Image (cartoon, coloured by chain):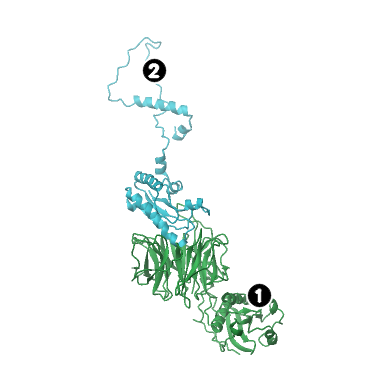
Chain colours: A green, B cyan
Amino acid sequence: MTKRIPITAGLVAIALLAAHAQQPPPSQQPPEISTTITGEAGAPPRLALPDFIAVSRDAETVAIAKTITQVLRDDLEFEREFSFIPRDVMATIPSATGFNDIAFDRWHELNADGLLVGTVDKQIGGLRVQIRLYNVRTRAVAYSHEYTSSNARLIAHTISDEIHKTQRALEGVARTKITFASDRDGERMTGTVVDREVKEIYIADYDGENQTRVTVGRTLNITPRWSPDARSIAYTSYRRGEPQIFVSHIYQGTLDELTKGAGSGQNWLPAWSPDGQRICFSSTRGGGPAQLYVVNKDGSGLRRLTNDKWVNTTPTWSPAGNQIAFVSDRTGNPQIYIINADGVGTAQRISTSENYADKPSWSPPPYNEIAYAAKTGPGNDIKIIDMATRQVRQITFGEGTNESPAWAPNGRHFAFMSTRSGKSQIFTVDRLGKGLKQITKIGNNQQPDWSR
Amino acid sequence: MSTHAMRSMPKYAAVLLLLFAVGCHKKAPPVVRPVPPPPPPTATPNQGQRPPTPPEPVAEPTIVPPEPVAEDRIASASLDDLNRNSPLKPVFFTLDSDELSAENQKTLEEDAAILKRYGTWTVTIEGHCDERGTAEYNLALGERRAVAARAYLVSLGIAADRLRTVSYGKEFPFDPGHDENAWAKNRRAHFVVTAK
């Protein structure tokens, strides 16, 4: 039996919107036991995940228990680290009413390696969820934990991340979020001489749930990028006429203007350094074509990185923060280059297999890959270059146009924009091109970025 | 008589009125000029009576407002109206290019003439791209197009500080279509008058 010791701070980096701020984060305790369930002969562990048990058996709790089970299964399937006993097969096993009447023999007959049982209990102020992951052969508990929260989906996401971490040594992404620009509200720009549609910055859970607008610029707001702590979003806004870099602190409701004032020129495409201290962006302030600049997150210490007569734009930092990949048209068309983050040294060309390459996104460890958009025909497709071998693989193949790849924090997936379903929409897919999933459906949505 | 009423009169009446006005106009000024003596009395049916008082003119000499010419309409238009029917013509580019064709140069020469005539105007030159390029690089490409148009106008004698540039990449297509016809319209430098 595990003891319940709520720990209130710091355990889960939960990004709560201001609107949800009154919800307490799930309280957790360190697991007492953690062993790993393994599959046979290197195969993924075969997991049984029956519906979580509603302790009070009322319809509302039963529905919440089903939701948690479904979200958890979706989260686990997203990483494909487990195989699952099909639902119709699971339906043949009598439901347990708690942790004391589990039909281990029957689960063993189905060749389940692991069995994840959960109970859901309504209590004042939220839900209390207990889980136990059993090794079906030994009936030993491999992992157990308890969660309290009013947010059922967040409980499921937290369970998924902990199962992945303890069982597969994997940083899951179930609690991450995706930001993007959207025109879905159909608002028109005011105070302009030309009738145009507003674009605002939105965020959504990594699975597309809880899509929420976080800016009220009533103008063109594009190219959002998460700060590494996932509490701020830097983006390009035209609210001053010329495009400038703004930073919205979305859980405080405050706004910084990173670039402003006379002579600041046009500024686009902010990119946070991995330590969150600096932002690289592209600016015309020097008078010529756009060049790369780096500035501290408080707007101080502006420094010019490139200084030539070509366009240098669309920066992204290497995961270690010592290099910057960017796009330059110095050969007459856009190609991807790398420079040292201090600007010293010569730019090294990376993309060679096409005559148009843009929007590099540098994957975090354990991979070392740059995803980018390449012109392949009338539209663009996503390609990935392995930085060790310089081998290029193509992920999309002319299904509409495909642009703006952005890696998930574990490097196993990326988000991108595609017009394959009609309008511009955000999709996620894994690094080998499998598991395509449409995240947005309303309006036009573009330029995704994936939080840590 | 109000100007409005004058305008609503049939054309011939306006012409008559105009002739009359011209006649009055000729008669009115000579206060200091020597005036020819009145003709000697002649044998008329009115002989022996005082000459009749000339009838009061039916209207004061009125300047008929000229039909407004195009230039005046431009000068008096609000910025919104001005930009809705922009006197400054956009220039169009080929795919992934910021080169100004001979036709573009001719268009910009016409635009420069307008900017010279309205020397107080300041203008934002917007650079736009078609949807085939990527959103990110198109921000820089749109700027190159706006800068190319600006540089040519400056070479024609337009003060650089009257011409701002801003790139919208492919965010605001002029034509939302997905064919070459639409793309050709969207690869453009577009002029917006921001002050006059």
Q: In which quarter of the image is residue A41?
A: bottom right
Measured from the top left, where is residue A357 in percent x and y? 45, 64
- Residue pointed to by mark 2: B52
Q: Looking at the image, which is closer to me, A259 or B8?
A: A259
Measured from the top left, where is residue A316 in percent x and y? 43, 69
Q: Which amino acid does label 1 sit on?
A: Ala
Q: Do labels 1 and 2 share a chain?
A: no
Measured from the top left, where is residue A207 in percent x and y? 56, 71
Above or below — where is A253 with respect to A32? Answer: above
Q: Which of marks 1 and 2 is in front?
A: 1
On the rendered image, what quadrant is the N terminus of chain A found in? bottom right
Measured from the top left, where is residue A150 in percent x and y? 58, 77
Say what secondary structure mark 1 lies in.
helix
Q: Looking at the image, which is closer to me, A36 or B125?
A: A36
- Mark-to-mark CA distance, 1 and 2: 108 Å
Q: In which quarter of the image is residue A55?
A: bottom right
What chain does mark 1 sit on? Answer: A
Q: Looking at the image, which is closer to me, A303 or B183?
A: B183
Would you say residue A353 is visible in this rendering?
yes
Q: Which mark is residue A63?
A: 1
Above or below — where is A47 with respect to A372? Answer: below
What chain does mark 2 sit on? Answer: B
Residue at image location 53% in from the left, 70% down from the top? A19
Above or below — where is A302 with respect to B174? Answer: below
Q: Residue A184 carries which label?
A: none
Q: Quadrant of residue B136?
A: bottom left
Q: Do the residues labelled 1 and 2 touch (CB within 8 Å)?
A: no
How dense is the environment of label 1, judged by Cα within 10 Å: few (below 14), some, or many (20 and up)? some
Say what secondary structure mark 2 lies in.
loop
Residue at image location 34% in from the left, 45% down from the top? B116
* Left or right side of A98 for B72: left
Would you say residue A150 is visible in this rendering?
no
